[in-house]
Amino acid sequence: MTSPPREPIAVIGTGYVGLVTAAGFAELGSEVWCVDIDAEKVARLNAGEVPIYEPGLEELIARHRERLHFSTDLAPALEHARLLFVAVGTPPTYSGDADLSAVYAVVDAMPTSDRHALVMKSTVPVGTGEAIKRRFRETGKEGFRYVSCPEFLKEGSAVEDFLNPDRVVVGDDGDWAGDAVVDLYAPLDGELVRTDIASAEMVKLASNAFLATKISFINEIANVCEETGADVAEVARGMGLDRRIGPHFLRAGIGYGGSCFPKDVSALKQLAGNSGYHFQLLTAVIEVNELQKRRVVQKLQKHLGSLVGKKIGLLGLAFKPNTDDMREASSLVLAARLQADGATVKAYDPVAEDEARRLIKGVEFCPSPEEVVDGSDAVVLVTEWPQFSALDLREVAARMRGNLIVDGRNFFDPDAVEAAGLTYEGVGR
Ligand code: NAD
């Protein structure tokens, strides 16, 4: 017996979330009609190129070429699909609120229809669904349905996360559109949380804010460990074995970055403020994260004194390993601070160099980690790319002018670093 054909869908916005969603639903059997306003991106996708780095994505897209269609035109998507997944960017505005202009560009491009639904994957403030439904009513498009279906994938393991979600959250008005989204996700194992639209929106913001809080919390514990002689890695292990706490997101480092945590924490803080509630905890989470990036400079100064004329090597630039995403990466703040203090900065990243070149000025980009190390007074490990574990620490010591390793992610074994004749500075150990 052949299985019934899967519902065709549309995906609007083919960035990290949109492409993974499109490829993931194609893997589950759907025909997917993708739309993006970036004509160059669409041309590259049509030529078989994948414009972002995400493990497994290129293979998945290649495998389902026949089911994936890319266009700048909405018409084919509206013709073939009734569910239109929205995955456009919602970057922060200067005030810290989410910029919803791309979302509303999509909303306003929708025709009058009783047959279609927008399914919101983009992360939006609580109340956005209600506001979009109002907009539909005001413009005579009340037949258009709306579903909130927030996305929880992690860059670096996004394909894996799509196919094996912890949970699928569907917020809707209990109509055909919510049922259809639930059906689409039915082959996946994650637990279904079907709820109202505002609660679904809040699940996403609260989850990211909680994870960011966990990171800032362990970073503050690390800073206290530095003052008191405890080792934060041991502390985190001891804490994480408590099932009420759990082991994840307890790795001290030089702060969180990326396209989600910074903007979503700030958006939730602003949302609370706009609604008349002062979310004190998130104010501290944000401040701790900003200070954490800058503590690296203090550690360098502690050993090197003034940084004027010093050569500092950065290992890794992406906001985390296995991605080329540089949005809000700690390396951006660090490179700028070091140069402002008079240091010369060299850097290497296995995949994010092209993105980094657009965002960081005055840095010498090296083709290998060894060349970053050459002649450096200090080397800072910024992103814990697994391949850095293959570095021969004795060779590193021989190539450097100085001998300081600042391990921003507690990645190296401190004893091995010191055995190679180098000085080790981690975070909280
Ligand atoms: P992105 O910037 O990588 O991609 C957005 C895409 O939308 C771009 O290709 C852009 O050209 C396109 N676009 C913009 N306006 C458009 C329009 N009017 N019509 C069609 N296409 C348009 O963004 P992203 O990282 O994929 O994030 C998308 C959303 O998902 C954001 O709200 C983000 O917060 C959320 N999210 C991201 C992640 C993540 O890890 N990146 C995880 C969960 C949720």
Image (cartoon, grey):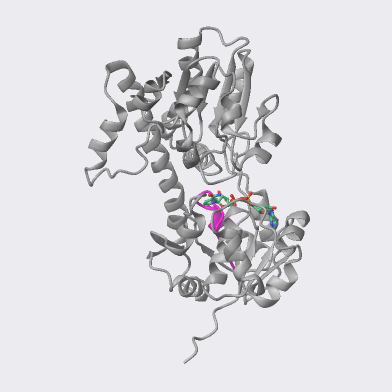
Answer left or right for 233 relative to 128: left
Question: Is residue 58 found left or right of 179 in the rendered image?
Answer: right
Against 124, residue 320 (above or below) is above
Q: Position of residue 244 (x, y in %)?
A: 24, 45
- Closest to the observer, 217 or 45: 45
* Quadrant holding the C terminus: top left
**340 relative to 245 in the view: left or right:** right
State the image quarter where residue 335 is shown.
Answer: top right
Residue 98 place in picture, x, y as percent: 58, 43
Q: Residue furthest top?
A: 305
Residue 400: quadrant of the picture: top right
- Residue drawn at point x = 59 percent, y = 53 percent: 16
Is any part of residue 189 visible from this angle?
Answer: yes
- Let me know if residue 112 appears in the view: no
**Residue 109 image position (x, y, % from top left):** 72, 62
Q: Name above or below for residue 401 compared with residue 35.
A: above
**Residue at 41% in and 33% down:** 411
Q: Is residue 127 magenta?
A: yes
Residue range in magenta is 117-131
Q: Give x and y (percent) for residue 162.
A: 48, 61
